[in-house]
C-alpha cells in the first residue's frame, strides 16, 4: 500500500474519518516531520472556520549524550569500581586510568562501594573494595528511560540524574485539530492578487480573494541613522537656543589669515600660524576682500599699539594677513559678527553661538583629530566680568549633564583673563580639557569700533570630547573615521545627557 502523502486534503479527510486528532500522533503514524504537519494545519487555520486548532504542551524526559553513553557502557561509578582489583590500587593510578574518575570515585565512595586506606607509615593512599559486586542501577534506569520515557523511575531519581546532566526535561508543542463551523473537504486557497488575466477572462467572478489586512505594518523603509556627534550637536544647539542665543553663520571653511588671526590680535609671528599647525590653501592662496576702514586700525594696534596698548612692535605685513587657510577656530566667525555689530548706529547687547567644523594640522591620537567640531558662545554687553563668564559656563555645562567642571588660568592672544575648561572623563579616568574661555581684549574689540565700556565674554569647546564623555568612549577614532562601528551608530541612544 503506497504511503499517504501529507497535504491539506489528506488532513481534512483524516479529520472527517477519525475526528479530532493530535498533530504529533498524526505525524508519527505517517512517518512525516511534525513541523510539516503543523505548517499544513496552520494554513488550514488561516482559511477561517474550516478547522479549530488548540495548542498542547507536553513535557517528557530525554537522555543527554552523556546519558546515552552511560545507558550503553555503564555509569562512571560502576566503571571506577570495576577498575579496582580485589587487592586494591593506588588512588593516583586509579584516577589516571578511568575517564571521569573524579565524579565516579566520589559516587562510588558515597554508595559504600569503595574505601580509601592510608598506610600508617606514610606513602600513597590506596583504594579498596568494600563489596564484592555492585548493581549499576543508574545504567538500568537510563536504559529503561531510553526505551520508554514513561519508565518506572521515581521523580526524585530523575531530578538527581538531571543534576548530573544525564537527563534533560524537554518541552514539546503539538496541536489538537477538530472540525470548525465551516468544515469542508474541498478547500480553495484564496487569491492574494487581482491579475489582468482574471479581469480579461472574467475568472475573477468565481474566485475567492484573501481580505486585505489594513492593520499590517508593512515592510519597514530603509533609513539612515544619526551619528552620536549629530545627536549631541542637536542637544547643544537646543541648550543655546533655550538660553537666548542666536546662531552665527558658519559657512566659510576657508578664511583669510586676517579674520582667523590678525583681527583677534594674534601676532603674525605666532607659532599657530606655522604650516605645521595650520592648513594653508594654495588655490586661491590669498584673499583681496578685506575691510578697508578696519584694516589700518588692526595694522596699527599690532605694530605700534593703540587704544591703551603698546602692541607687539613689529612690522605688520598685509601679504601675511591675506593668506587663505582652513579656519583653525570658529572665533574667526565671532570676529566677523562683532565687527558687523560695531557698524550698527547704536550698540545692542547680543548673545551668539556657533557649532561647526574647524581644521588643525594635529598629530592624530586618542583625543586629537585634524578635523573636528568647535562649539562657541559669546555674550557682548556692558559691565561683563570674569564672574559672569564662569557663571554662564557652569550653567551651560550643567544643562549638558556635566557637573564636574574645573577652570585653569591660561593664555590666549585675544582674551585676558583666559581660562581652560576641564571635565572629568570616567572612561579615561582623568580630567580632560574640553574647552577654552576668556574676556576678549580691548586690542581686539576697540579697533572694530565697539564702545569702550562694552565687554565680550566667550568660550569654545570641541563637540567630540563631550560626546566621548557622555558615550563613554576612550578613543576619538572610535567616534570618527574608518574605525567607527556602524552598529553603534544605528543603535546608540538619542543623547546620553543626564539632566
Image (cartoon, rainbow, N blue to C red):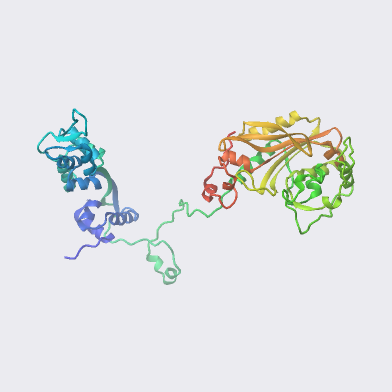
Q: Which quarter of the picture shows residue 248?
A: top right
Between residue 52 and residue 491, name the one nearer to us.
Answer: 491
Q: Quadrant of the N terminus?
A: bottom left
**Figure disc tally:** 0
Measured as percent of width and height from the top left, residue 470 is found at 58, 38
Image height of 471 relative to 287, above or below: above
Measured as percent of width and height from the top left, residue 35 is found at 29, 54
Image height of 150 relative to 195, above or below: above
Q: Quadrant of the C terminus?
A: top right
Query: Going by the picture, which residue comes out furthest to the left?
Result: 132
Query: Going by the picture, which residue comes out furthest to the bottom?
Result: 201
Measured as percent of width and height from the top left, residue 208 is found at 37, 61
In the rendered image, is residue 431 in sight?
Answer: yes
Residue positioned 78% across, 53% down in the render: 324
394 displayed left or right of 144: right
398 displayed left or right of 383: left
Measured as percent of width and height from the top left, residue 359 is found at 70, 49
Between residue 86 and residue 194, name the one nearer to us.
Answer: 86
Residue positioned 72% across, 50% down in the render: 276
Between residue 163 and residue 180, name the one nearer to us.
Answer: 163
Between residue 232 and residue 119, name the one nearer to us.
Answer: 119
In the rendered image, is residue 181 in sight?
Answer: no
348 displayed left or right of 99: right
Query: Going by the picture, which residue comes out furthest to the front?
Result: 121
Residue positioned 81% across, 30% down in the render: 383
Residue positioned 29% across, 57% down in the render: 36
Amino acid at each position: 500500500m503506497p504511503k499517504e502523502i501529507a497535504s491539506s486534503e489528506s488532513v481534512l479527510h483524516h479529520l472527517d474519518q477519525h475526528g479530532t486528532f493530535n498533530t504529533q500522533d498524526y505525524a508519527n503514524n505517517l512517518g512525516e516531520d511534525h513541523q510539516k504537519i503543523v505548517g499544513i494545519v496552520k494554513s488550514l487555520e488561516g482559511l477561517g472556520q474550516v478547522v479549530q486548532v488548540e495548542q498542547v504542551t507536553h513535557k517528557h524526559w530525554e537522555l543527554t549524550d552523556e546519558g546515552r553513553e552511560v545507558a550503553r557502557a555503564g555509569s562512571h561509578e560502576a566503571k571506577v569500581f570495576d577498575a579496582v582489583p580485589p587487592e586494591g590500587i593506588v588512588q593516583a593510578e586509579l584516577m589516571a586510568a578511568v575517564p571521569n574518575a573524579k565524579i565516579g570515585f566520589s559516587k562510588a565512595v558515597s554508595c559504600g562501594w569503595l574505601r580509601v586506606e592510608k598506610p600508617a607509615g606514610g606513602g600513597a593512599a590506596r583504594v579498596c573494595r568494600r563489596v564484592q559486586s555492585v548493581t549499576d542501577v543508574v545504567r538500568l534506569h537510563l536504559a529503561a528511560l531510553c526505551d520508554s520515557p514513561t519508565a518506572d523511575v521515581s521523580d526524585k531519581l530523575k531530578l538527581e540524574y538531571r543534576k548530573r546532566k544525564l537527563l534533560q526535561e524537554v518541552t514539546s508543542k503539538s496541536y489538537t485539530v477538530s472540525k470548525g463551523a465551516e468544515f469542508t473537504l474541498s478547500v480553495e486557497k484564496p487569491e492574494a492578487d487581482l491579475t489582468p488575466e482574471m479581469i480579461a477572462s472574467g475568472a475573477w467572478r468565481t474566485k475567492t480573494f484573501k481580505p486585505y489586512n489594513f492593520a499590517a505594518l508593512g515592510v519597514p523603509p530603509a533609513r539612515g541613522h544619526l551619528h552620536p556627534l549629530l545627536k549631541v550637536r542637536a542637544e547643544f544647539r537646543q541648550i543655546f537656543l533655550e538660553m537666548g542665543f542666536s546662531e552665527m553663520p558658519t559657512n566659510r571653511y576657508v578664511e583669510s589669515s586676517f579674520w582667523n588671526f590678525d583681527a583677534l590680535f594674534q601676532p603674525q609671528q605666532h607659532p599657530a600660524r606655522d604650516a605645521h599647525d595650520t592648513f594653508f590653501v594654495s588655490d586661491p592662496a590669498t584673499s583681496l576682500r578685506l575691510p578697508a576702514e578696519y584694516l589700518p586700525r588692526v595694522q596699527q594696534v599690532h605694530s605700534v599699539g593703540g587704544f591703551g596698548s603698546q602692541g607687539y612692535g613689529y612690522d605688520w605685513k598685509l601679504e601675511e594677513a591675506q593668506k587663505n587657510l582652513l579656519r583653525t577656530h570658529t572665533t574667526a566667525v565671532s570676529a566677523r559678527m562683532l565687527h558687523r555689530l560695531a557698524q550698527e548706529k547704536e550698540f545692542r547687547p547680543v548673545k551668539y553661538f556657533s557649532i561647526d567644523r574647524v581644521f588643525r594640522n594635529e598629530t592624530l591620537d586618542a583625543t586629537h583629530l585634524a578635523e573636528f567640531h568647535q562649539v562657541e558662545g559669546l555674550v557682548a554687553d556692558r559691565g561683563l566680568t570674569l564672574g559672569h563668564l564662569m557663571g554662564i559656563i557652569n550653567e551651560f555645562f550643567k544643562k549638558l549633564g556635566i557637573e564636574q567642571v574645573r577652570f585653569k588660568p591660561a593664555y590666549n592672544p585675544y582674551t585676558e583673563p583666559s581660562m581652560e575648561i576641564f571635565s572629568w572623563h570616567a572612561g579615561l579616568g582623568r580630567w580632560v580639557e574640553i574647552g577654552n574661555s576668556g574676556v576678549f581684549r580691548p586690542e581686539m574689540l576697540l579697533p572694530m569700533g565697539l564702545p569702550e565700556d562694552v565687554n565680550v565674554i566667550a568660550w569654545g569647546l570641541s563637540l567630540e570630547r563631550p560626546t566621548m564623555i557622555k558615550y563613554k568612549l576612550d578613543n576619538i577614532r572610535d567616534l570618527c573615521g574608518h574605525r567607527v562601528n556602524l552598529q553603534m551608530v544605528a543603535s546608540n541612544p538619542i543623547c546620553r545627557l543626564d539632566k
